[in-house]
């Protein structure tokens, strides 16, 4: 595992990790399995999408309310800990952020992050997860060596060598006690392998899903909410977990977003979901695709000549609706690596899903 890290300033965090996914998010089905203590505030708050919120002067039974994980004072042990199971099958981590927003006189002063690989298919997975809770578990590898944390601030570290083996579980150690508001693990989800089968057609999978390694790359505008929400599982809970742009005023304006499929392949169905967008859904949409053969670290420009229609023509949209395009509405069959969603002229979309067959390696 990587032992060398470099700090990332708070002003550079979003830019530095803009081409990654926060794997430590409840929006990606990550969960806290256990923790040493959460007397003042639940450890599950570490995984809440979006920035922490502040309610000064608001008190609950245990004391002041905090949007984060806070343990009681005078910890008799060396540190407090929280055990996180990633919602993706496994992932590679490139950077780690600890946000102590609004924790001032009660923040955790140091942090260590450890990782382990325990695939769900392992017949001993359940018992091994129980063992992880105890000090007898010996398979933790240090991902982030001990680092100082400051009061009410974002602090992050880039791994000079991203974690080699994939990870499924993370343990956060907070020294000696106190509070962290958010844990963010910036990296890439690894799609699960398909079991070898004979005489069976390849299954239809959600090629674009963040759970499969899908990645939102760029957009014309992300004024209200980011394009990364487009690839989350489920239909979400409200307008805040979709992609919404500012209102346009120029004639002929359109907004666009480009995503990289986690599983390149051939599409058989496209879904554009406007759930919760009622007075601000796009008038229409277009969906294009491309088989990008350039350097894998590059991305296709939005105006590249290689974009071709995936959904045939411009399609009118409705409020709060899953728009499904398949069959004769879809130019299916071609191998694709990236997709572009264009909103006409602007507005909001909750989810953008591309289903199909993953490409088989030669």
Image: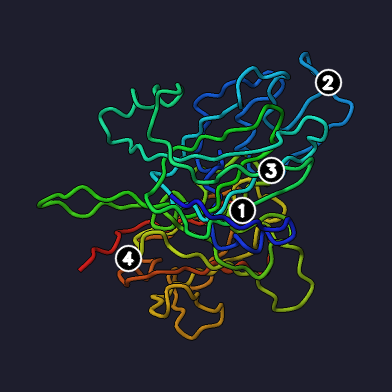
Q: Nearer the viewer, mark 4 or mark 3?
A: 3
Q: Which of marks 1 and 2 is in front?
A: 1
Q: In this view, does 118 lie above or below 77?
A: below
| Secondary structure under the numbered disc 4 in the rendered image | strand
Numbered mark located on residue 266 in the image = 4
**Residue in the image at 47% along x and 39% along y:** 86
**Quarter occupied by residue 362:** bottom left
The residue under label 3 is 148
Report if the CB atoms under discs 4 and 1 are less than 8 Å apart. no
The residue under label 2 is 59
256 and 5: which is toward the camera: 5
Q: Distance between the residues labelled 1 and 3?
A: 11 Å
Report if the CB atoms under discs 4 and 3 are less than 8 Å apart. no
The image's colouring method is rainbow
46 and 4: which is toward the camera: 4
Q: How far apart are marks 4 and 3 (CA)?
A: 47 Å
The residue under label 1 is 157
User: Which residue of the protein is positioned furthest toward the right in this rendering?
Assistant: 57
N-term mark: 2 or 4: 2
Q: How far apart are marks 4 and 1 (CA)?
A: 37 Å
Q: Position of residue 32 (x, y in %)?
A: 53, 30
- Which class describes the residues within 10 Å of circle 4: few (<14), some (14-19), or many (20+)? many
Relative to 338, 302 lies left or right:
right
Q: Which of marks 1 and 3 is in front?
A: 3
């Amino acid at each position: 595992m990587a032992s060398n890290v470099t700090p990332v300033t708070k002003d550079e965090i979003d830019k530095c990790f803009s081409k990654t996914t926060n794997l430590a998010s409840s929006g990606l089905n990550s969960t806290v399995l256990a923790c040493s203590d959460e007397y003042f505030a639940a450890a599950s708050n570490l995984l809440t999408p979006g920035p922490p919120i502040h309610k000064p002067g608001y008190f609950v039974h245990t004391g002041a309310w905090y949007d984060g994980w806070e343990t009681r004072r005078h910890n008799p042990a060396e540190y407090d800990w929280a055990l996180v199971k990633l919602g993706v099958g496994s992932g590679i981590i490139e950077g780690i952020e600890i946000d102590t927003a609004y924790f001032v006189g009660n923040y955790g002063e140091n942090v260590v992050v450890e990782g382990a690989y325990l695939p769900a298919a392992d017949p001993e997975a359940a018992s091994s997860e129980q063992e992880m809770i105890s000090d007898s578990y010996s398979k933790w590898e240090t991902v982030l060596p001990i680092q100082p944390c400051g009061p009410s601030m974002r602090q992050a570290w880039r791994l000079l060598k991203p974690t080699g083996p994939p990870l499924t579980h993370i343990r956060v150690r907070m020294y000696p006690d106190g509070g962290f508001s958010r844990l963010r693990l910036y990296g890439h989800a690894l799609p699960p392998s398909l079991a070898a089968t004979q005489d069976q057609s390849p299954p239809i999978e959600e090629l674009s899903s963040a759970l499969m390694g899908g990645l939102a790359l760029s957009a014309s505008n992300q004024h209200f909410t980011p394009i990364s929400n487009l690839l989350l599982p489920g239909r979400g809970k409200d307008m805040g977990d979709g992609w919404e742009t500012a209102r346009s005023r120029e004639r002929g304006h359109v907004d666009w977003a480009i995503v990289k499929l986690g599983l390149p392949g051939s599409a058989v169905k496209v879904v554009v979901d406007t759930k919760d967008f009622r007075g601000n859904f796009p008038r229409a949409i277009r969906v294009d695709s491309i088989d990008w053969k350039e350097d894998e670290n590059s991305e296709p420009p939005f105006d590249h000549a290689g974009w071709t229609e995936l959904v045939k023509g411009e399609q009118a949209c409705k409020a709060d609706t899953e728009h499904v395009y398949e069959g004769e509405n879809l130019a299916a069959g071609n191998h694709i690596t990236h997709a572009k969603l264009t909103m006409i002229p602007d507005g909001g979309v909750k989810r953008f899903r591309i289903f199909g067959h993953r490409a088989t390696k030669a």
